[in-house]
């Protein structure tokens, strides 16, 4: 599995802050540790208590078994904490009900008699059976008190784990939060200050130094791009303007006015000018006017102007203009010119002899009755350099439409079937 896929899988899920994750992890760690300690403590306590009580009962039972044959009833203990019974097979009814059904050979079992709790052991002495009951009521009460105190302390620790975990996470992640806050306030138009010096003594200093190197290269790239767009804007437009001017002069000659090569030169120069204008526009980041307001344009006026400009290219084509609603779009005029111009040019080049243009319900629709596209072609139609069918161009038309649509959050919907035509809908919301 590629490294990028593994990272995506690890980061998949709801977006939760790192501080919250660390605090939660600390709280869960404390909960697991406290729970484990309580379980181990209670288990060890029960084991030691059982061994101790069974040892006491076994010791007293051994002394009773040794002394009873010589001393008789005098050997049977009867005190506040230890009570003994020695009965024959037909005398068990005289025992407390809790002892009557106990078999011989028990080293220790806990039974309740009224409000008292006893640890009981049984043993055969001759043809009789001996019972010893050691009163452990006080021990059980102290054990219950101990467990209650331990559980209360654990709950207090767990309750404190959340705020303490949050405080520890906040203190521990303070350099990371500071770095994230600093990066969050960066602006593309402002050169970033070096971060390495500010985070030199923290582990995130490695990230800060790497980010400084990245931003340095990015600033150089942005500067080169700005220089290129500025130079291209001048160096490419100037010779095109000369070509177009020369073509206009030549077209004034009657014998050259209808010249096929001259017409192709004129059309190619205008297409090249539009392409350069489109690429330079997309290379610049002009999302707002100088005063900060979003640029606006009338979509219906742009559509009509582009249709008028492309009428010389509609030889043999029938353009049906449907509803053209008045619509103001939050985008510069050139953006809509690029989008609609490329949609219309694509339909004129690859569509059939009928093209339909509609602007209604904030949707700009260009449809044709051409050859259409299959499913595989539709998946790649907006990719740069994708070309198909007769008369394929550079593969930039629909790619530029997609670029403009992505910049201004316009939604594109493509519907096409082989031999039935293509419809592209641009939602200008």
Image: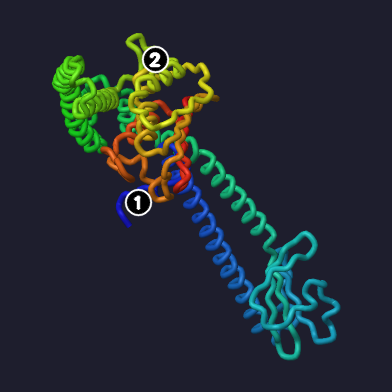
Residue farthest to the front, as pictured: 255
What percent of the width, then of the height, locates residue 179? 30, 30
Q: Quadrant of residue 262?
A: top left
Q: Which mark is residue 426?
A: none
Coloring basis for residues: rainbow
How packed mark 2 is, by other alpha carbons closer than 10 Å (few <14, some 14-19, many 20 or more), is some
What percent of the width, then of the height, locates residue 389? 33, 45
> Which residue is the site of mark 2?
295
Gap in Å between the C-alphas at discs 2 and 1? Answer: 40 Å
Please name whichever residue, 143 or 303, is drawn nearer the observer in this view of the structure.
303
Please name whichever residue, 122 or 208, is drawn nearer the observer in this view of the structure.
208
Q: Is residue 419 above or below residue 65?
A: above
Question: Helix, strand or loop at disc 1?
Answer: helix
Q: Is residue 249 above or below residue 260?
A: above
In front: label 2 or label 1: 2
Please name whichever residue, 401 or 122, is drawn nearer the observer in this view of the structure.
401
> Which residue is the site of mark 1?
5
């Amino acid at each position: 599995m590629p490294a990028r896929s593994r990272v995506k899988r690890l980061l998949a899920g709801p977006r939760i802050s790192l501080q919250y994750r660390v605090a939660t992890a600390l709280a869960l760690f404390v909960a697991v540790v406290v729970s484990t300690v309580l379980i181990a403590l209670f288990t060890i306590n029960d084991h030691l208590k059982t061994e101790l009580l069974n040892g006491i009962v076994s010791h007293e039972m051994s002394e009773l078994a040794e002394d009873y044959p010589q001393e008789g009833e005098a050997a049977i203990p009867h005190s506040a904490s230890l009570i003994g019974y020695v009965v024959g097979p037909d005398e068990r009814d005289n025992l407390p009900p809790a002892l009557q059904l106990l078999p011989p050979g028990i080293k220790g079992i806990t039974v309740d008699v009224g409000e008292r709790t006893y640890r009981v052991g049984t043993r055969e002495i001759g043809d009789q059976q001996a019972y010893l009951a050691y009163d452990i009521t006080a021990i059980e009460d102290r054990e219950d008190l101990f467990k209650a105190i331990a559980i209360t302390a654990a709950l207090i620790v767990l309750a404190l784990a959340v705020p303490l975990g949050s405080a520890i996470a906040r203190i521990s992640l303070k350099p990371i939060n500071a770095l994230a806050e600093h990066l969050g306030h960066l602006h593309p138009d402002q050169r970033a200050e070096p971060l390495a010096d500010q985070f030199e003594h923290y582990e995130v200093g490695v990230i800060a130094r790497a980010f400084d190197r990245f931003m340095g290269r990015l600033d150089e790239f942005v500067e080169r791009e700005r220089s290129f767009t500025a130079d291209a804007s001048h160096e490419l437009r100037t010779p095109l303007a000369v070509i177009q001017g020369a073509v206009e002069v030549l077209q004034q000659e009657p014998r050259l006015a209808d010249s096929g090569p001259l017409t192709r030169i004129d059309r190619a120069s205008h297409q090249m000018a539009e392409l350069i204008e489109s690429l330079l526009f997309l290379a610049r980041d002009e999302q707002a006017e100088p005063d900060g307001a979003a640029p606006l344009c009338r979509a219906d006026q742009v559509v009509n102007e582009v249709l008028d400009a492309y009428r010389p290219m509609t030889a043999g084509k029938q353009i049906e203009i449907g509803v053209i609603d008045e619509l103001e779009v939050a985008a510069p005029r050139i953006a809509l010119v690029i989008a609609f111009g490329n949609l219309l040019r694509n339909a004129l080049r690859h569509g059939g002899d009928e093209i339909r243009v509609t602007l209604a319900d904030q949707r700009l629709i260009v449809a044709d009755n051409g050859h259409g596209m299959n499913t595989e072609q539709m998946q790649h139609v907006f990719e740069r350099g994708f070309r198909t069918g007769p008369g394929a161009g550079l593969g930039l038309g629909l790619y530029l439409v997609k670029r403009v649509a992505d910049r201004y959050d316009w939604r594109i919907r493509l519907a096409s079937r082989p031999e039935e035509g293509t419809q592209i809908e641009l939602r200008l919301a």
